[in-house]
Image: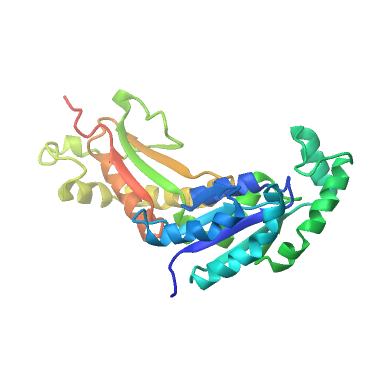
Amino acid sequence: MKSDHQFVIITGISGAGKSHVLKTFEELGYFCIDNLPVLLITKFAEICQQTDANIKRVALVIDIREGIFFDDLFNELDTLKNLGTPYSILFLEASDDVLLRRFSETRRKHPLSGSGTVLDSIQIERQKLRKILNSADHVIDTSPLNVHELKDRIFQAFSPIEKKSRMKITINSFSYRYGIPPDSDLVFDVRFLPNPHYVEDLRPYTGMDKKVEEYVLEFPLTKNFTNKSWKLIEFLIPAYIKEGRAYLTISFGCTGGKHRSVVIANEFCRILLKKKYTEVTVSHRDIGWHR
C-alpha cells in the first residue's frame, strides 16, 4: 500500500557535515533522529504509519558508528520499500584534505581510529561506504561549501514548499512614543505621510478601519513610498535567506502607532502574501495606547 510518509537516510563520510544537515532538516519540519540503529528503521516506519502524531517526513542519520549492523541497511531499506514508504539516500562527501583539516580543528577522533593515522581511517571508511555511495539518490560534496551554502543545497533538494515561503516574516506597527520594537531587523519611519489624526472625522478611528486606510493610501506620496520600499524589501529578503536567516521582522512607526503605521503594516502584509511569502504575520503593538 502506498504511504504518504517519506524517509531521508542521511549518511556519508565522517566529518562531511551530517550534524549540520540534520539541523537543517529539523528546520524543514522533518522528524530527525541521529544514529538510529539500522535494525530499527522499519520498526520506526511502522510506528509512524500507526501513530496519531502525524509524523510524515523523517530524516535519519545512519553512519559508520553502526558497526557490523551497517551491512544490514539495504535489507532494511528493502523492507521499507515493501511497506510502501518512499525513501531517498543523501550521501555527504568531502575531500581528504578538508576532512583532515576538520578533524584537526575540532580535535575529534575518527570513528574508525585505531593504530593508523586519521587518513588511514578515512580511506577505510570510504571503502566501507562505497556501495551506499553508489546507491545514493543525492550526493553533496561539502568541501567547498560553508554552512549557509550547505543549508541552501538541502533546502533546494528537500524543501516541500517554495524557497521564498520558508522565511517567517513579522510586520510590526508601533509608536515612536514608546520606542522601536527591539526585535526589528528593518525599520521604516512613516511620520512624513499625511496624518489622519488631524482629520476630525478620522481621528477616533484606527488604521484598521477602511476609511482611514483609504485616506492614507490614496496619496501619491504614500504610493511612491510603498513602491520604493517594496523594491528594497524584495531585494533584501533573498539576501537574508541566503545567509541562513529563518526570521525577519519589519517595523513601521508613526507618532501614535494608531493610524499611518497600522495602514502601512497591513499594506505590506498584503503585498508579501500576494508574492507567495506565506508565513507572514502582522502585529500592531501600540494601536490601543493612546491619550
**Most foreground residue, 91 or 274:** 91
Question: Is 142 positioned to the left or the right of 32 in the image?
Answer: right
> Can residue 162 be seen at all in this image of the molecule?
no
Residue 261, picture quadrant: top left
Answer left or right for 148 relative to 192. right
> Which residue is depicted at the point 42% across and 34% down?
184
Q: Is residue 267 visible?
A: yes
| Quadrant housing the C terminus | top left
Say left or right for 249 vs 139: left
> Residue sitting at 21 percent across and 51 percent down?
214
Identify the residue at horizontal 28%, vertical 33% (top origin): 285
Of residues 210 and 134, the one nearer the viewer is: 134
Most extreme residue toward the bottom is: 1
Q: Which residue is at 33% across, 34% downward?
A: 253
> Horizontal and vertical percent for residue 115?
88, 39
Whether residue 118 is situated above or below residue 29 in the rendered picture? above
